[in-house]
Image: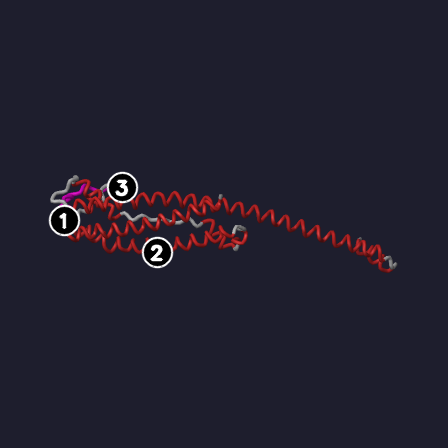
């Protein structure tokens, strides 16, 4: 309709009407583009809000997990310090059961599994551009790079658990006594320990003290890693405020 009318105005050399028709076309196109742009921004804004909510949920989960692992690392450090003190005494001042219980922390390896759901979706789908806060994007990139480093540190210490601590227990202690408080399934309970006093034989040896110090070093290393990640987690959550 508009094209036929424009053609008729051109043939009739009614230039004012031609210009008026062109203005109508241009204004119509401009309004249409503005509406499309507005609608696209609304959709992007809604998607960004959904991602931000998911990021917050991930980091609140990370924060809770880190607090739990920090508590485990701190308890392991306390146990190692107690064992170091007991090893220097002529006779232990705590019970045999407590000695074995404290030593069980040697096999405890605090582990932080970072939640990557939202960030993986953002980077995998190419939607990272939807996050308009540049500080947040930079903080997220730095956070997950630090998480990879923490994972590498944990993996290294897991190898030490298998190569150093577990063989020491098997060779020198009653594993059932050390692990008796660890219950994984209710229907297959571990039998009672038969030689739990073996820890008294090795308590004052240099090897025992070295094992304790080695575990203290690992636990403090992990504690520093987790505290650093907790600080980064709080910084991201603060940006999300």
| Residue 10 magenta-highlighted | no
- Which of the pair 47/67 is nearer the observer? 67
Q: Is residue 52 left or right of residue 150?
A: right
Nearer-N-terminus badge (1/3):
3
Please name the residue that numbered disc 3 is placed on.
183
Q: Is residue 235 left or right of residue 6?
A: left
Relative vertical location of residue 210 with respect to residue 60 in this rendering, above or below:
below
Nearer-N-terminus badge (1/2):
2
**x and y percentages locating residue 63 in the rendered image:** 40, 44
**x and y percentages locating residue 101 in the rendered image:** 21, 42
Please name the residue that numbered disc 1 is placed on.
204
Q: Which secondary structure lies at badge 1?
A: loop
**Mark sitting on residue 152:** 2
Residue at image x 74%, y 52%? 27
Mark 1 to mark 3: distance in Å?
A: 29 Å
Question: Which residue extends farthest right?
Answer: 12
Residue at image x 14%, y 49%? 204
Q: Nearer the viewer, mark 1 or mark 3?
A: 1
Residues rendered magenta in the picture = 182-201
Residue at image x 17%, y 48%? 173
Rendered image quadrant of residue 82 = top left
Nearer-N-terminus badge (3/2):
2
- Is the stretch drawn in magenta largely helix, strand or loop? loop
Mark 1 to mark 2: distance in Å?
A: 33 Å
Q: Nearer the viewer, mark 3 or mark 2?
A: 2
């Amino acid at each position: 309709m508009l094209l036929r009318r424009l053609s008729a105005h051109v043939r009739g050399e009614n230039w004012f009407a031609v210009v008026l028709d062109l203005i109508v076309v241009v204004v119509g196109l401009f309004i249409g583009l503005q509406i499309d742009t507005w609608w696209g921004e609304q959709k992007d804004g809604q998607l960004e809000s959904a991602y931000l909510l998911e990021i917050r949920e991930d980091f609140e989960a990370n924060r809770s997990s880190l607090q739990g692992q920090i508590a485990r690392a701190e308890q392991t450090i306390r146990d190692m310090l107690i064992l170091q003190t007991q090893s220097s005494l002529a006779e232990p001042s705590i019970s045999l059961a407590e000695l074995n219980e404290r030593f069980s922390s040697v096999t405890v390896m605090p582990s932080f599994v970072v939640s990557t759901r939202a960030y993986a979706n953002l980077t995998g789908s190419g939607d990272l551009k939807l996050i308009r806060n540049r500080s947040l994007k930079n903080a997220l990139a730095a956070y997950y790079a630090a998480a990879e480093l923490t994972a590498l540190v944990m993996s290294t210490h897991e190898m030490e658990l298998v190569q150093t601590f577990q063989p020491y227990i098997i060779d020198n202690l009653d594993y059932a006594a050390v692990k008796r408080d660890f219950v994984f399934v209710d229907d297959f309970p571990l039998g009672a320990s038969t030689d739990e006093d073996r820890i008294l034989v090795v308590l004052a040896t240099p090897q025992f003290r070295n094992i304790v110090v080695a575990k203290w070093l690992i636990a403090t290393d992990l504690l520093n890693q987790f505290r650093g990640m907790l600080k980064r987690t709080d910084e991201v959550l603060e940006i999300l405020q």
